[in-house]
Image (cartoon, grey):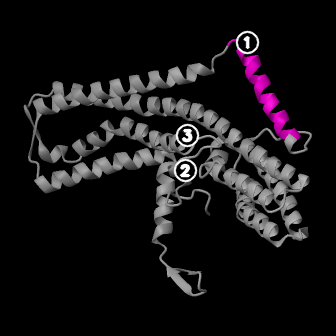
Amino acid sequence: MSSDWDTAGRTVTRPENPSRRRFVHEWVFLTGNRMLLAGGLALAALLAFGVLELWFAFDRYDVTAFLYLTAAVIGGNFTLITIVLSINQLVISQQLSAPGELEAEIKASSEYRDTVTGILDRDTAPATPAAFLEVLFNGVNHSLKALADYGDASTDSGAADDIDDAVTALGSHVDTMSAKLRRSNQTVFSALVLTLNTNYSEEITEIARLKVDLREAGGVPPEVEDELDTLVTRLKQIDVARQYLKTLYMQEELARLSRRLLYVGGPTIFAMVSVLALVIVGDTRVLDAAQLAWLVPAYVALSVAPLAVLVSFILRLSVVAERTVAVTPFTTSTQEDPSVVDITQD
């Protein structure tokens, strides 16, 4: 159990179950090892068929029916692996470019880095994803501190309160993100996963409203308006970096999916073909149920293994695509819904 405070200052006891559900949800859909999840799905199939065996007390296995099932599973796995690999190779083939296209892409990336370093008043920017994002968040933090200093020095209490409200929540978030980026490993996904909760469209909208309110209240000092504009630009640069990291991650993940599917699918098809050959050369028409009581559930788990690998990877790819579908200044209810798992929490 955990304790918190309500708006009246009373202690409220909250159960830990939501945190555990959040951890399980996060592990299954995002942070968990995909091959371990695929193994869990295959094991679930094995256990489910084992329960069916015990529940219905199978005592006969018809060889003909088993042959039909085996042939269908082999054909299905061949089709699954072929289609997925074809689609993945089509996506990966988009990375192949002529020298001129490669030069233009490199130039565009370099111009983006130069833009970021110019906005952040830096000479260089890190090359690794986590360190680059940390620099972007540090730039946002610098703007927030400058605005906070203006609010503290302002004689207009209303303007100071408005600025403080806008700075406090975003500043806490930025500090948390910077700390997590410093602790993360330097992979593309470890950096991307920390940015999936928001693209800062709502914060940018609130900053625009703040500027309007300050103008109506008596005008905005030029240095404050410039700092607010700089803050918006820096928030937009985070979303640009996020979208680029998403592109890199999906290409990397699809390549990894193709390789894992081959690792699992090849031996699976070979094993099933071997079982089919052994059954065909058998002399009896009905196999002994006691001998096959352990073989058949294992065979079922083996047959769904390629599908389990595909499902485990698609779960994460679909979540990443859903949470990054909108670009600034637009957002989606799914991306900003507070009921959705907060993947930036410890």
Q: Which residue is mark 1?
A: 99
Between the C-alphas of marks 3 and 2, the distance is 9 Å
Q: Is residue 186 visible?
A: yes
Q: Residues within 10 Å of mark 2 (few under 14, many from 20)?
A: some
Q: Amino acid at mark 3?
A: Val
Q: Earlier in the sequence, mark 3 or mark 1?
A: 1
Residue at 84 percent across and 52 percent down: it is 225
Q: Amino acid at mark 2?
A: Gln
Residue 106 percent across, percent down from the top left: 77, 24
Q: Is residue 169 above or below residue 238?
A: below
Q: With 276 as the anchor, is 258 left or right in this view?
A: right
The verdict on residue 101 being magenta is yes
Q: Is residue 47 above or below residue 17?
A: above
Q: Which residue is mark 3?
A: 325
Q: Earlier in the sequence, mark 1 or mark 2?
A: 1
Q: Earlier in the sequence, mark 3 or mark 2?
A: 3
SS for dot 1: helix
The verdict on residue 158 being magenta is no
Q: Could you say which quadrant of the image residue 308 lies in?
A: top left
Residue nearest the observer in this picture, 293 or 306: 306
Residue 44 percent across, percent down from the top left: 32, 51
Span of residues in magenta: 98-118
Residue 269 percent across, percent down from the top left: 34, 28
Q: Is residue 199 above or below residue 176?
A: above
Residue 153 percent across, percent down from the top left: 91, 69
Residue nearest the observer in this picture, 143 or 209: 209
Q: Which residue is mark 2?
A: 335
Between the C-alphas of marks 3 and 1, the distance is 30 Å
Q: Amino acid at mark 1?
A: Pro
